[in-house]
Image (spheres, rainbow, N blue to C red):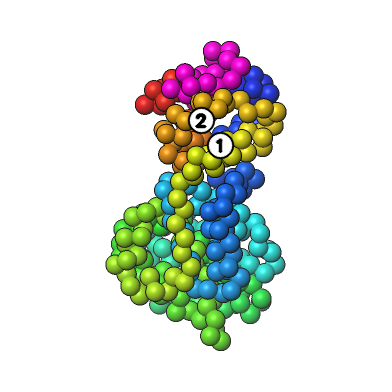
Amino acid sequence: MTIYQKYWSLKEPPFENVPDQKVFFRSSQHEEALSRLMYAVENRKGAAMLTGEVGSGKTTISRVMSDALPEDKYLVRTVTNPALTPLDLLRSILYEIGVETDSDSKFFLLTKLHDRLQENQQQGIRTIIVVDEAHLIQQRESLEELRMLLNMQFEHQFLVTLIILGQPPLLLRIETLLPLKERISVKYHLKPLDLKDTVRYILFRLRNAGAKRGIFTREAIFPLYEYSRGIPLRINNLCDRCMLIGMMKSAGAIDTAIVNEAIADLG
């Protein structure tokens, strides 16, 4: 146990910024986003898209979705760095589903991909490819390759479901690719938490870490919300800095003065 955890009587750090499905905060919109992704997967849709600001919870939602799917019926794999050439993107997807190749033949890569997807289908396994940080894909041709994957079908069913995650710029790129846009049957945009959900989120993270009390005063929430704008990543960063400063000051609770000092400290 760290000094930080001992001071605040916590079993673990409450505001880590690593996507973790164990601390999935089920706000109404996060629940809806999860439900839409589950619908797309369970109903064999070709593609679904989840967008939101950095740190809004997109990756965590995709991991919660993956955990909820039976491993004997679904193969879920994630491409975490999709800012690749079309050929490298295909190789990356193949690698994730267990096929390694350095071929430069697009025909060969697509054939191997189709064969593996159809093999999975015949074994009763649905293949789900999550493309995270899709807003980083700069080449139009790479986005076109994602669309082409949806041409892989068997007995009038998609052989793969694409889950496309990205920040708001992704929406503009998809708008310029009408063939791909029309294939995305399920969409959802995560908005920042409102003030009420921000309070619930902070309490949820503290309770999950073993806290027996709120730690933050009621008044402290207002500057905290104003700074974070309800974005979980920013909430985590600020709350963590507040608790560090509070410990160094031997404070019993985090008040407005500590929050303002933490904001200045974060720059």
Prevailing secondary structure class for the magenta stretch in the rendered image? helix
- Which amino acid, by three-letter code, is at mark 1? Val
| Secondary-structure class at tag 1 | helix
Indicate the position of residue 62 as horizontal and vertical percent values: 55, 56
Q: Quadrant of the N terminus?
A: top right
Q: Quadrant of residue 70?
A: bottom right
Q: Quadrant of residue 140?
A: bottom left
Q: Is residue 221 visible?
A: yes
Residue where numbered disc 2 is placed: 221
Indicate the position of residue 242 as horizontal and vertical percent values: 51, 24
Indicate the position of residue 177 as horizontal and vertical percent values: 32, 69
On screen, residue 169 above or below 100? above
On screen, residue 211 above or below 200? above
Q: Who's the residue at 57% across and 49% down the image?
A: 27
Q: Which residues are magenta?
A: 241-260
Front-most of 225 and 145?
A: 225
Residue 258 painted magenta: yes
Q: Is residue 92 visible?
A: no
Given contact means CB atoms under 8 Å apart, are the residues at marks 1 and 2 in contact? yes
Q: CA distance from mark 1 to mark 2?
A: 7 Å
Left or right of residue 167, residue 48 in this image: right
Residue 85 painted magenta: no
Q: Residues within 10 Å of mark 2 (few under 14, many from 20)?
A: many
Q: Quadrant of the C terminus?
A: top left
Of callouts 1 and 2, which one flags the residue occurring earlier in the amino acid sequence? 1
Front-most of 231 and 64?
A: 231
- Which amino acid, by three-letter code, is at mark 2? Ile
Residue where numbered disc 1 is placed: 199
Q: Who's the residue at 61% across and 25% down the image?
A: 215
| Secondary-structure class at tag 2 | helix
Indicate the position of residue 155 as horizontal and vertical percent values: 56, 86
Q: Who's the residue at 40% across and 52% down the image?
A: 167
